[in-house]
Amino acid sequence: MLDLEVVNEATEAIAELSVEVFGEKITWHDVQIGQRVFYSRKTASDSHYEVKVTFESGVNFSKQLGYLTHGVDFKDQLVVIGHDVVLKREEPQEPR
Protein backbone atom coordinates (compact mmCIF):
# COMPACT_ATOMS: atom_id res chain seq x y z
CA MET A 1 0.00 0.00 0.00
CA LEU A 2 1.17 3.52 -0.79
CA ASP A 3 0.03 6.48 1.31
CA LEU A 4 1.38 9.67 -0.25
CA GLU A 5 1.17 13.22 1.04
CA VAL A 6 2.44 16.17 -1.02
CA VAL A 7 3.10 19.47 0.76
CA ASN A 8 3.64 22.89 -0.82
CA GLU A 9 6.35 24.59 1.26
CA ALA A 10 7.42 26.83 -1.64
CA THR A 11 7.00 30.61 -1.52
CA GLU A 12 4.17 30.66 -4.08
CA ALA A 13 1.06 28.72 -4.98
CA ILE A 14 1.26 25.83 -7.42
CA ALA A 15 -1.03 26.15 -10.44
CA GLU A 16 -0.60 22.48 -11.41
CA LEU A 17 1.10 19.63 -9.60
CA SER A 18 1.30 16.13 -11.05
CA VAL A 19 2.80 12.93 -9.72
CA GLU A 20 3.18 9.88 -11.90
CA VAL A 21 3.61 6.57 -10.08
CA PHE A 22 2.76 2.97 -11.08
CA GLY A 23 1.98 4.26 -14.58
CA GLU A 24 -0.82 6.47 -13.23
CA LYS A 25 -0.76 10.27 -13.34
CA ILE A 26 -2.43 12.15 -10.48
CA THR A 27 -2.95 15.90 -10.97
CA TRP A 28 -3.95 18.62 -8.49
CA HIS A 29 -4.68 22.27 -9.32
CA ASP A 30 -4.35 25.46 -7.24
CA VAL A 31 -2.27 24.02 -4.40
CA GLN A 32 -1.77 26.94 -2.03
CA ILE A 33 1.28 27.65 0.14
CA GLY A 34 1.20 25.26 3.10
CA GLN A 35 -1.53 23.10 1.57
CA ARG A 36 -1.32 19.30 1.67
CA VAL A 37 -2.80 16.91 -0.90
CA PHE A 38 -3.14 13.15 -0.55
CA TYR A 39 -3.18 9.96 -2.63
CA SER A 40 -3.43 6.27 -1.69
CA ARG A 41 -3.35 3.05 -3.67
CA LYS A 42 -2.12 -0.51 -3.64
CA THR A 43 1.49 -0.99 -4.75
CA ALA A 44 0.90 -2.72 -8.08
CA SER A 45 4.53 -3.00 -9.21
CA ASP A 46 7.95 -1.48 -8.68
CA SER A 47 7.94 2.23 -9.52
CA HIS A 48 9.34 5.70 -8.77
CA TYR A 49 7.91 9.22 -8.60
CA GLU A 50 7.88 11.58 -11.60
CA VAL A 51 6.86 14.98 -10.18
CA LYS A 52 5.98 18.01 -12.32
CA VAL A 53 5.31 21.42 -10.79
CA THR A 54 4.03 24.59 -12.46
CA PHE A 55 3.83 27.62 -10.19
CA GLU A 56 1.30 30.44 -10.63
CA SER A 57 4.18 32.60 -11.95
CA GLY A 58 4.61 30.14 -14.84
CA VAL A 59 7.94 28.78 -13.59
CA ASN A 60 8.02 24.99 -13.85
CA PHE A 61 10.30 22.05 -13.12
CA SER A 62 10.20 18.28 -12.94
CA LYS A 63 12.05 15.66 -10.93
CA GLN A 64 12.26 11.89 -10.67
CA LEU A 65 12.88 10.47 -7.22
CA GLY A 66 12.25 7.61 -4.84
CA TYR A 67 11.75 3.93 -5.45
CA LEU A 68 8.76 1.82 -4.52
CA THR A 69 8.85 -1.97 -4.35
CA HIS A 70 5.86 -4.21 -5.03
CA GLY A 71 4.61 -5.91 -1.86
CA VAL A 72 5.98 -3.30 0.57
CA ASP A 73 3.87 -0.63 2.33
CA PHE A 74 5.11 2.95 1.97
CA LYS A 75 4.11 6.13 3.79
CA ASP A 76 5.81 8.92 1.83
CA GLN A 77 5.77 12.69 1.91
CA LEU A 78 6.90 14.77 -1.08
CA VAL A 79 7.73 18.34 -0.05
CA VAL A 80 7.96 21.11 -2.65
CA ILE A 81 10.58 23.58 -1.41
CA GLY A 82 11.72 26.35 -3.74
CA HIS A 83 12.26 24.71 -7.13
CA ASP A 84 12.91 21.27 -5.70
CA VAL A 85 11.03 18.27 -4.32
CA VAL A 86 12.30 16.35 -1.30
CA LEU A 87 11.17 12.83 -0.36
CA LYS A 88 10.56 12.08 3.31
CA ARG A 89 9.80 8.43 4.00
CA GLU A 90 8.76 6.52 7.08
CA GLU A 91 10.47 3.16 7.38
CA PRO A 92 8.81 0.83 4.82
CA GLN A 93 6.77 -2.01 6.29
CA GLU A 94 6.23 -5.52 5.02
CA PRO A 95 2.45 -6.03 4.72
CA ARG A 96 0.79 -8.15 7.39
Image (cartoon, rainbow, N blue to C red):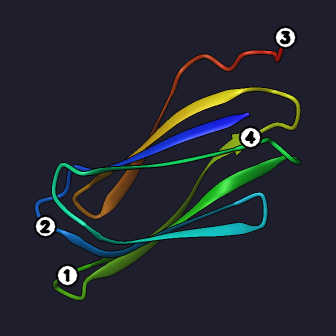
What is the distance, in whole Å, between disc 2 and disc 4 at their CAs?
A: 29 Å
Mark 2: few/some/many CA within 10 Å (<14, 14-19, 20+): some
- Which residue carries the number 3 mark? 96
The amino acid type found where label 4 is placed reads Leu
What is the distance, in whole Å, between disc 1 and disc 4 at their CAs?
A: 30 Å
Question: Nearer the N terminus, badge 2 or badge 3?
Answer: 2
Pointer 4 and pointer 3: residues touching (CB < 8 Å)?
Answer: no
Position of residue 88 measured from the top left corner of the image (x, y, whole percent): 45, 32
Position of residue 5 measured from the top left corner of the image (x, y, whole percent): 45, 42
Question: Nearer the N terminus, badge 4 or badge 3?
Answer: 4
Can residue 53 be seen here? The reply is no
- Which residue carries the number 4 mark? 68
Position of residue 60 measured from the top left corner of the image (x, y, whole percent): 34, 80
Name the element at disc 1: loop
Question: Nearer the N terminus, badge 1 or badge 2?
Answer: 2
Pointer 1 and pointer 4: residues touching (CB < 8 Å)?
Answer: no
Name the element at disc 3: loop
What is the distance, in whole Å, between disc 3 and disc 1 at their CAs?
A: 43 Å
